[in-house]
Image (tube, rainbow, N blue to C red):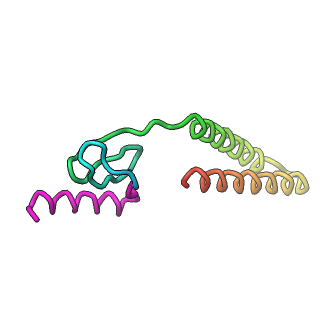
Amino acid sequence: MSAEDGSKIKSAASILLKGGTLVSEQCPKCGGVQVRFGGKTTCINCGQESKEEKPAQAVAATDSAAAIERRISALAAELADEKDLAIQKQKADLLETYLRILEKMRSLSVR
């Protein structure tokens, strides 16, 4: 193994430690192993990079998550100003529901 190969492996290991993932498809250029991180796929062997296009479904999910995040922020602000305990409870329950929905959406989009 050459020093260059060792450097490539260390670079790939660094990407994996940061949260990158190994890609099951081989590099189309050289057939090498690929690593995906930050919306970019990089071949460990030849260094070819490709940016990922988000499918329409992923864009829609991102937009939906952003809408829920806005609702959570607005509801949290309302909750801070609310004096009526019954309304506080309703808003806190709704806030908890929004947070659960957001968590589920994020766990589904990671897969």
Is 43 on the left or on the right of 94, as rendered? left
Where in the figure is residue 15, as x and y percent of width and height?
A: 32, 57
Give the dominant element type of the magenta stretch: helix, strand or loop.
helix
| Residue placed most toward the observer, 34 or 31 | 31
Is 93 on the left or on the right of 66, as rendered? right
Residue at the extreme left: 2
Quarter of the rendering containing residue 96 = bottom right
Quarter of the image for the C terminus: give it: bottom right
Instruction: Inspect the magenta stretch and tell me whether residue 8 lies in it.
Output: yes
| Residue placed most toward the observer, 82 or 20 | 20
Q: Which residue is depicted at the point 57% across and 36% down?
A: 59
Quarter of the rendering containing residue 33 = bottom left
Where in the figure is residue 95, as x and y percent of width and height?
A: 75, 52
Where in the figure is residue 71, as x and y percent of width and height?
A: 71, 42
Quarter of the image for the N terminus: give it: bottom left
Image vertical order of residue 56 relative to residue 24, above or below: above
Image vertical order of residue 75 relative to residue 20, above or below: above
State the extent of the magenta-drawn residues as a range: 1-23
Q: Which residue is depicted at the point 35% across and 61% down?
A: 16
Where in the figure is residue 73, as x and y percent of width and height?
A: 67, 44
Total labels: the figure holds 0
Q: Which residue is depicted at the point 72% across and 48% down?
A: 76
Q: Which residue is depicted at the point 50% across and 37% down?
A: 54
Is 30 on the left or on the right of 75, as rendered? left
Image vertical order of residue 6 relative to residue 50, above or below: below
